[in-house]
Amino acid sequence: MDKKIVVTKSDYIISAVSKAQYPTENLPEIAFIGRSNVGKSSLINSLCNRKNLARTSQTPGKTQTINFFRVTFKVDEQLTPIHLVDLPGYGYAKTSKVNRRIWAKFIEEYLLASQNLKFVCQLVDMRHDLMDSDKKFFAWLVEKNLPVLIVTTKADKLSKTEQKKQLALIQKTFGIDELPILPYSSNTNVGRAELLETILDSVEDN
Ligand SMILES: Nc1nc2c(ncn2[C@@H]2O[C@H](COP(=O)(O)OP(=O)(O)OP(=O)(O)O)[C@@H](O)[C@H]2O)c(=O)[nH]1
Ligand SMILES: [Mg+2]
């Protein structure tokens, strides 16, 4: 790690369900996607060192809109504002099929329409093998040429040995050996510095 990245400011901007509601300010965006309850909102809080910036819940299906957060990174004296985008979870069984289709539609619309999207963090629970919905969503991202970083969540719930085993399994199930994959824990902040750096690099690239 060669630079010290500090998050100096983080604000909730807007909850959107259609294009017209996206923020008017054009900033680089990083989006977080994954099954309900995988820890997307918790990860955003952990990145920002905040407890309740993004609302979290033990019950799946908490986030139901596209939530934009404006977050300022500081390296040396330079400030870099970006948007972190919290998306509703996929594969949430308790929602009606119609509801699921509507969600899928506005998530898809966002991911395909955003001019500012730098990459998508697809979160998967490190304790389990991938579900069909994870594989399908990943395949969709690849098909659409959207850059993706796989983040495995809840690393704190596994021993180092178990983590290694699960990482290998998840990598194998995704079917891509050289796929970037980052273990994360919102409880202990494992992976936080690496993710901040990856985000900043993606923003500075262009
Ligand atoms: N131990 C542990 N628990 C976590 C971690 N991240 C999230 N959780 C817990 O997992 C549950 C779900 O977290 P959320 O951040 O609300 O999950 P989400 O992916 O935003 O869920 P939806 O909004 O429903 O799609 C909460 O009870 C969190 O406390 C983690 O890194 N470690
Ligand atoms: Mg959420």
Image (cartoon, rainbow, N blue to C red):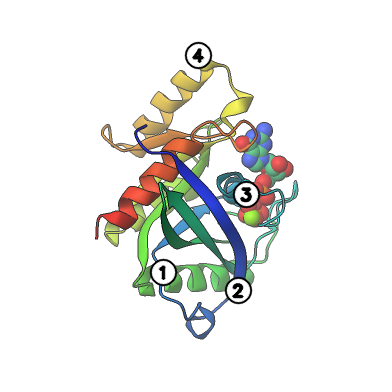
Against 155, is 205 above or below?
below
Task: Indicate the position of residue 206 as horizontal and vertical percent values.
Answer: 24, 61
**Tag 2 or tag 3, which sits nearer the N-term?**
2
**Tag 2 or tag 1, which sits nearer the N-term?**
2
SS of the residue under disc 1: loop
- Where does label 2 land, which residue? 14
**Separation of marks 1 and 4 at Cα, in angstroms:** 40 Å
- Where does label 4 land, which residue? 161
**Separation of marks 3 and 2 at Cα, in angstroms:** 16 Å
- In the figure, residue 110 lies in which quadrant? bottom left
Task: Indicate the position of residue 37 as horizontal and vertical percent values.
Answer: 65, 47
Against 11, is 163 above or below?
above
Q: Nearer the viewer, residue 123 or 78?
A: 78
SS of the residue under disc 3: helix
Whether residues under marks 1 and 4 lie with C-beta atoms below 8 angstroms apart, the answer is no
Give the residue displayed 52% in from the left and 59% down from the top: 71
Between marks 1 and 4 in the image, the one whose residue lies nearer the viewer = 1
**Separation of marks 3 and 1 at Cα, in angstroms:** 19 Å
Task: Indicate the position of residue 156 as horizontal and vertical percent values.
Answer: 61, 26
SS of the residue under disc 4: helix
Give the residue displayed 45% in from the left and 48% down from the top: 122
Q: Can you name the residue that lies furthest to the front here?
A: 77
**Dot 3 beta carbon under 8 Å from ligand 1:** yes
- Where does label 1 land, which residue? 27
Identify which amino acid the numbered label 4 is placed on.
Thr
Identify which amino acid the numbered label 2 is placed on.
Ile
- Where does label 3 land, which residue? 45
Between marks 2 and 4 in the image, the one whose residue lies nearer the viewer = 2
**Tag 4 or tag 2, which sits nearer the N-term?**
2
Identify which amino acid the numbered label 3 is placed on.
Asn
